[in-house]
């Protein structure tokens, strides 16, 4: 597997690429070594473009949460700003100013108590935002423990068994014991009632997920906070909450404005989101905000003297692209609150339509119908035994649709599901095409399965 060791497979002959359209007389381009000689930019462009054309078509990708379409104007703005380096705040003060404006806009959207002086930063995505939010929790806990003369060497972080892999990474990289609250029954996320058994004085924080990647449902942040209020009243231990709003941070404010999940809840000290998911920007942008400056320990902030300026930064990266920050600002201006609401509402309408259609099909059982995130999760119906979600996923792929099939986290690994993320650009028309292809796939699998009982197929249908 080793991601850092990119290897050619042993059976792959070491033939070079043989582009037919070379213009500089070159006939062979090595694949695993930098070529000895230069080539014309047009030639390199064509070779690389042809290679990436083999990637799947992003518009048929119902697996990803990440933005695959923006306005032409956004594309032009991107082209005009992709040379900007976010760290050069001294060189690109206006990009830095735009970043601060976006942070304040999000502070306002998420009801930060002092939105005009919101504390936060852009990141490369939610993953970096989670790392920074988690680090701030750990540092604050350590500082408080040491100040009280208590041991600070066994930090733990509590979260549902459904958390995104980044929290496992956080715990591993920063040596914090991960405590996963196992899933139970038909609720596939963290709930308040099973939380407190896992919390103690060494808990740096609880992660509540607004929009589980498993099924798109929201964890009950308000109830989780209330349970921790009771815990504090009983034990004196104050456990803060970080909300992983990777997707929900840009959905709930528009579709469920009355839901209490953000800084309106006192116990929520930090929130991160992915600008490149429902923030509607191309990949490479996330945001993390703290309730106020007290929740971001000053000793984590570096004051870098760079090109003559004093620049406070809290980030894992040094250089990183600034264009995505500009694009986030573009989306805020372009759509406004009403535009965001319309886009997200359309996604939810499409998700509901898909869920309703699936409910009418005995082959499927709907697990989540897009009422929280515009995500539909479904398993095979009770009567279906001859084929499974993996067969359906494979069959759909023949028509270009990427619909992931996977099992739920520990304790509910028995349940295998398919998931559809409805994103901006997945129209009602496309949904109809998809549903027709799904119907065809199911009929095909049914036909394949029915003429002979399974025993007569020694190989079964599973490869
Ligand atoms: C996508 C996701 C992440 C990771 O976000 P990136 O922006 O891809 O780094 C973390 N948590 C949740 C709940 C997510 O959906």
Image (tube, rainbow, N blue to C red):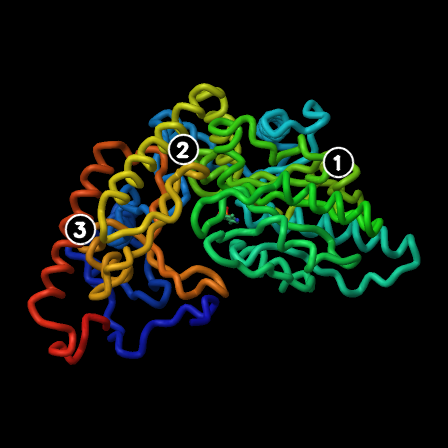
Q: In this view, does 178 lie above or below 426?
A: below
Task: Check disc 2 and report the residue beneath it.
Answer: 79
Give me the C-alpha separation between circle 3 and circle 2: 33 Å
Whether residue 302 can be seen here: no
Residue pictured at 48% horizontal, 57% vertical: 185
Residue 371: x percent and y percent? Answer: 42, 36
Residue 397: x percent and y percent? Answer: 22, 55
Quadrant in which the N terminus appears? bottom left
Task: Decide which of 117, 46 is in the foreground and name it.
Answer: 117
Give me the C-alpha separation between circle 1 and circle 2: 29 Å
Quadrant in which the C terminus appears? bottom left
Residue pictured at 40% horizontal, 33% vertical: 79
Badge 1: residue crowd in 10 Å (few <14, some 14–19, many ≥20): few
Task: Check disc 3 and report the residue beneath it.
Answer: 399
Task: Decide which of 269, 364 is in the foreground and name it.
Answer: 364
Residue pictured at 22% horizontal, 47% vertical: 361
Under circle 3, the secondary element is loop
Q: Residue 208 carries which label?
A: none
**Which of the marked residues, 1 or 2, is nearer the chain's N terminus?**
2
């Amino acid at each position: 597997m080793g991601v850092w060791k990119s290897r050619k497979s042993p059976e792959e002959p070491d033939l070079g690429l043989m582009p037919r359209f070379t213009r500089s007389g070159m006939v062979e381009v090595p694949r695993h070594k930098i070529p000895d000689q230069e080539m014309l930019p047009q030639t390199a462009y064509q070779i690389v473009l042809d290679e990436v054309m083999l990637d799947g078509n992003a518009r048929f990708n119902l697996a990803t949460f990440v933005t695959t379409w923006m306005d032409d104007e956004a594309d032009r703005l991107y082209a005009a700003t992709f040379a900007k380096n976010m760290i050069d705040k001294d060189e690109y003060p206006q990009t830095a100013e735009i970043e601060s404006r976006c942070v304040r806009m999000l502070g306002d959207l998420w009801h930060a108590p002092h939105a005009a002086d919101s504390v936060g930063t852009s990141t490369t995505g939610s993953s970096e935002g989670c790392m920074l939010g988690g680090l701030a929790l750990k540092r604050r806990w350590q500082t408080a423990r040491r100040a009280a003369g208590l041991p600070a060497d066994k930090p733990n972080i509590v979260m549902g068994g459904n958390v995104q892999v980044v929290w496992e990474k956080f715990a591993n990289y920063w040596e914090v014991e991960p405590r996963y609250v196992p899933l139970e029954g038909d609720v596939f996320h963290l709930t308040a009632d099973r939380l407190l058994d896992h919390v103690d004085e060494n808990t740096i924080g609880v992660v509540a997920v607004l929009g589980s990647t498993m099924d798109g449902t929201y964890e009950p942040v308000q109830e989780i906070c209330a349970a921790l209020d009771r815990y504090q009243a009983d034990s004196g231990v104050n456990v803060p909450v970080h909300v992983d709003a990777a997707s929900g941070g840009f959905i709930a404010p528009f579709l469920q404005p009355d839901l209490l999940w953000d800084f309106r809840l006192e116990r929520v000290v930090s929130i991160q989101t992915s600008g490149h998911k429902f923030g509607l920007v191309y990949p490479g942008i996330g945001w993390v905000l703290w309730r106020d400056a007290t929740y971001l320990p000053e000793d984590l902030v570096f004051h870098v003297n760079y090109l003559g300026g004093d620049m406070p930064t809290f980030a894992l990266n040094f250089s990183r692209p600034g264009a995505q920050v500009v694009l986030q600002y573009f989306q805020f201006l372009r759509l406004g609150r009403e535009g965001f609401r319309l886009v997200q509402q359309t996604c939810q309408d499409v998700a509901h339509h898909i869920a309703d259609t699936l409910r009418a099909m005995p082959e499927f059982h709907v697990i989540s119908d897009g009422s929280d995130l515009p995500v539909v999760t479904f398993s095979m119906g009770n009567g279906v035994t001859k084929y499974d979600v993996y067969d359906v996923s494979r069959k759909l792929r023949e028509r270009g649709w990427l619909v992931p099939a996977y099992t739920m986290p520990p304790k509910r690994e028995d349940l295998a599901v398919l998931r559809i993320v409805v994103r901006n650009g997945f129209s009602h028309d496309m949904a109809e095409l998809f549903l027709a292809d799904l119907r065809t796939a199911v009929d095909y699998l049914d036909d394949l399965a029915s003429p002979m009982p399974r025993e007569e197929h020694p190989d079964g249908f599973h490869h």
